[in-house]
Image (cartoon, rainbow, N blue to C red):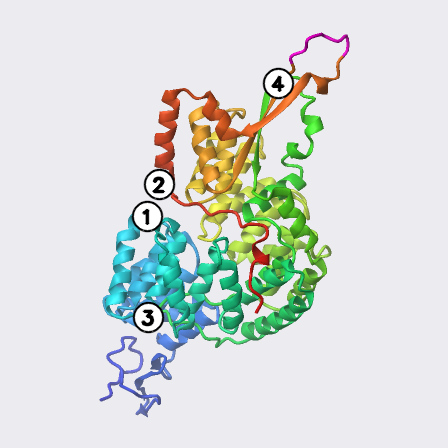
Amino acid sequence: MRFVATAGVSVLLAFGAGCSAVDVKTGIPVLTKGGEGILIDEAQGLPDLERGKQARLSGNPDAALKDLQPLAEQGYPEAMMQLAGLYQDRGTIASLDDAEKWYRQAKNSIPEAGLSLATLLINRADRQLLPEINALIRNADRRGNPEADSVRLKLLIQFPDLDVDGVGDRIAARALRSDLPEVQIQALIWYRQNIARDGYAAALETNCAKLLSIDPACYIDLAHFYRYRGERDRLNKLVDDALAVFQAGAGDSSAPRPDSARLYREAVDYGSLAGRLASAMVDEMTDDDDDLAKERQSGLIQDVEDDEAKEVLVSAPLTTEVVSETPGGAAAATQASATQIVELADKILRWMLAKDGGFRAEAAIVAVRYPFLLPELDLEATLRPVVETGDPAATQALANLLFNGQRSTRKPYEAVELYKKCLTFIDTKTRAEMSLGRVYQLGILGNPDPVSALDYYLRAGRAGSVQAYIGLARMFSGVPGIRPNRVNTYVFARRAQDGGRSLLYRVRKLKRLTTLPVTIDAADMFDIEKTTLLDYINSEMSPQEREQAKTLYDAEKLFQPVLRQPVPPDIYTKGRAS
């Protein structure tokens, strides 16, 4: 049976079954359903589901919205799914509300939409949503949906405290045996995110070598392994192969992508992958450490740990300085620096500069993070047009560039406005909060604003930023404008320790002299004692303060029961060569 709609009417009355061609009778377009959805041929501007899907796939969200919005509002479930995915593609916090609305409506007709909704709710990182998320996953299980394991792994990555009794290991092993590439890819992401666990580095390398054709992100993982083991020939070949794959993928607008009517997943960003590959040649620290190091290089923070002679000249009977330490510390940096391959990173970035689309902007983003790369490139001029399009990564990079002033003139006021813009994007919100906390703590715009600093630091810490908890511990241990508070210092220092970051406490004390020399060098007047901040504060607190600190710590831990641990410096030498 076949139904027709008169020209000029946008409502689709029905669609034919099993047809791939379009019949035209007396000028009236016949609506059919092809393999990819409803088709409206010769519709003269009427909403078209397939056209909307293709516009979304090719990166034209405005055109996609014109086709998908009317159809979704008229009640077509597949259009609702595509529209929800379109809003989720935007990556803003506000757009999540629209995406959630359409997923909820679509799942009444398309049960698979429940998993897409679960993925969106997981991204909100709200523990109060866990009962609904678990219910959605159980419903998918009852229907035999093979993609449920993929969403389970996303849930465990977002809420690692839920991974008890090795459940994540079992799900990941099962996911690797799946026939669905998207499920296998999520298993690889699981190993990647938890690489510090015993055996995970070897599992990641082995499975990436097997599944390289379905997950191009594996090129970055293998690059880390080959670089850190000094396997230069394998690394060179891997880079050449990766760039060929990235170029082919970026030029293929019909590249396979899971249909959002089954399970939402972002399209592959080959520009970002190329940038990550270049970074893999030179990276040697975590994101939080990277931010702090850039500020030290730009002179915004004095690294007293590297200038102890200067520190002891301060003429005070008792002074302290809180310093964060990463396990491995200098040894980790030495190992990484010894294996940096700057010329190969520059080769990748210059290849990116010759490409269209997002490759050039991504090269500039990498050079902002590693200022010794692409020294000839005008980073500010390259990033500004991309920032105007609302790109989150470019906005964050330009903010860092203008804030640190290493490759451009420092413009802290504009940088702060850009950081505030980053607060609206899902991917950059927590990092922006961390950056703004430091801005107001240091008084970059004038006088320090400790109240604003505490607000931003606290939000970032509760979202999982260990560096933010370090900032909070520093502030309450004694900075201008904040009354020292032993209880708060203990709580936040212990949270930093939960994230694998110990805080050293250095105390300068006057020496006890048996005789008083006529002249004495200032450096000879003091002893420097080192302990951990937690040990020092614990020794200073009263029993009542210790009880209060325990209560507040338990409450603070509820926001993020498990914090991400630093990656051991030798982790990439532990893989198993394929």
Of circles 4 and 2, the one toward us is 4
Residue marked by disc 1 = 127
Q: Which mark is residue 511?
A: none
Q: Is 366 on the left-hand or right-hand side of 417?
A: right
Mark 4 to mark 2: distance in Å? 38 Å
Count residues near mark 1 (Cα–Cα under 10 Å), then give few for <14, some for 14-19, many for 20+: some
Position of residue 121 relative to residue 307, above or below, is: below
Position of residue 435 relative to residue 354, above or below, is: above
* Earlier-in-chain disc, 3 versus 4: 3
Q: Which mark is residue 509?
A: 4
Q: Nearer the viewer, residue 127 or 152?
A: 152
* Earlier-in-chain disc, 3 versus 2: 3
Disc 1 secondary structure class: helix
* Earlier-in-chain disc, 1 versus 4: 1
Disc 4 secondary structure class: strand
* Earlier-in-chain disc, 2 versus 1: 1
Q: Amino acid at mark 1?
A: Arg
Mark 3 to mark 1: distance in Å? 25 Å
- Secondary structure predominantly adopted by residues drawn in magenta: loop
**Residue 22, horizontal then vertical, whole percent:** 34, 89
Image: magenta residue range: 512-519
Q: Which mark is residue 558?
A: 2
Mark 3 to mark 2: distance in Å? 32 Å
Mark 2 to mark 1: distance in Å? 9 Å
**Residue 300, horizontal then vertical, whole percent:** 63, 36
Residue marked by disc 3 = 146
**Residue 315, horizontal then vertical, whole percent:** 67, 17
